[in-house]
């Protein structure tokens, strides 16, 4: 299993004041908690943390957290960042186990150019991430879907994507993830025709009900 080592120091003080002082020293306050462990306040190196979070796995990176001479597996549960500088202000790290299933969101990427797009259509992707259930050892970097074979109006649903072994998608199997829409011009013409037909239908006299004589003027 791929992990990223993250050095941590146990801090004795809690609260906003000590946290601000830590940040002034160029460090990040954090808390480590989860099954079988008491919430433990930590101090982290922002350089190591931010480098990992900006990597290809993002928040799905699995850390080997060194705490008090003992190694623990942990993942980011929550991150607080400065809205302007995007500096990491605080991190919640959750204890995980290599063989225990967890729920995570993984990016969905489409590969290639759909045939329907070549014909003038537009590829519409309905989801940018997929909610998955798997163990830390099997977390994929992303789910990649080849769309080159899609023609106009073709779709790809959840049940059609190939997931790695040991990975389960939590969405409904029939849910559409991608569809090639028709060219906008064709759609607009279809709408205009439908509107015109509706208008003509409204202008036409109503047909007499069964057994009722047609109405005449005069």
Image (cartoon, rainbow, N blue to C red):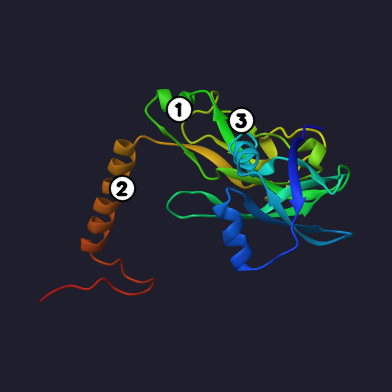
Q: Nearer the viewer, mark 3 or mark 2?
A: 3
Between the residue at mark 3 and the residue at mark 1, the CA separation in whole angstroms equals 16 Å
- Residue 52 occupies which quadrant of the picture? top right
Disc on the earlier residue, 3 or 1: 1
- Residue 181 occupies which quadrant of the picture? top left
| Count of marks overlaid on the render | 3
Between the residue at mark 3 and the residue at mark 2, the CA separation in whole angstroms equals 32 Å
Instruction: Depth check: give the residue in front, 32 or 7.
Output: 7
Instruction: Depth check: give the residue in front, 101 or 13.
Output: 13
What is the secondary structure assignment of the residue under circle 2?
A: helix
**Residue 169, image x, y percentages:** 72, 45
Q: Nearer the viewer, mark 2 or mark 1?
A: 1
**Residue 62, image x, y percentages:** 75, 41
Q: Which mark is residue 116?
A: 1
**Residue 76, image x, y percentages:** 69, 50
Lateral position of residue 74 relative to residue 211, left or right: right
**Residue 194, image x, y percentages:** 31, 50
Q: Is residue 178 above or below residue 96?
A: above
Residue at which label 3 appears: 145
Q: Looking at the figure, which quarter contains the N terminus?
A: top right
Between the residue at mark 2 and the residue at mark 1, the CA separation in whole angstroms equals 20 Å
What is the secondary structure assignment of the residue under circle 3?
A: strand
Residue at which label 2 appears: 191
Q: Few, some or many C-alpha atoms within 10 Å of disc 2 (few <14, some 14-19, many ≥20)?
A: few
Instruction: Depth check: give the residue in front, 207 or 85.
Output: 85
């Amino acid at each position: 299993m791929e992990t990223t080592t993250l050095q941590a120091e146990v801090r004795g003080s809690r609260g906003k004041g000590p946290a601000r002082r830590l940040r002034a020293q160029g460090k990040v306050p954090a808390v480590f908690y989860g099954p079988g462990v008491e919430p433990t306040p930590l101090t982290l190196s922002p350089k190591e943390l931010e480098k990992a979070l900006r990597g290809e796995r993002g928040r799905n990176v699995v850390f080997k957290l060194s705490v008090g001479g003992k190694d623990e597996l942990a993942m980011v549960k929550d991150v607080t960042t400065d809205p302007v500088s995007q500096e990491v202000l605080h991190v919640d790290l959750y204890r995980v186990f290599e063989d225990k299933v967890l729920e995570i969101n993984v990016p969905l990427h489409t590969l290639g150019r759909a045939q329907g797009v070549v014909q003038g259509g537009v590829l519409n992707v309905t989801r940018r991430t997929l909610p998955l259930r798997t163990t830390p050892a099997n977390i994929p970097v992303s789910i990649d879907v080849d769309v080159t074979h899609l023609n106009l109006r073709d779709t790809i649903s959840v049940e059609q994507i190939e997931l790695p072994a040991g990975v389960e998608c939590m969405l409904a199997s029939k849910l559409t993830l991608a569809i090639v829409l028709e060219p906008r011009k064709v759609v607009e013409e279809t709408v205009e025709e439908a509107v015109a037909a509706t208008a003509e239908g409204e202008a036409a006299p109503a047909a007499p009900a069964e057994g009722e004589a047609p109405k005449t003027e005069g």
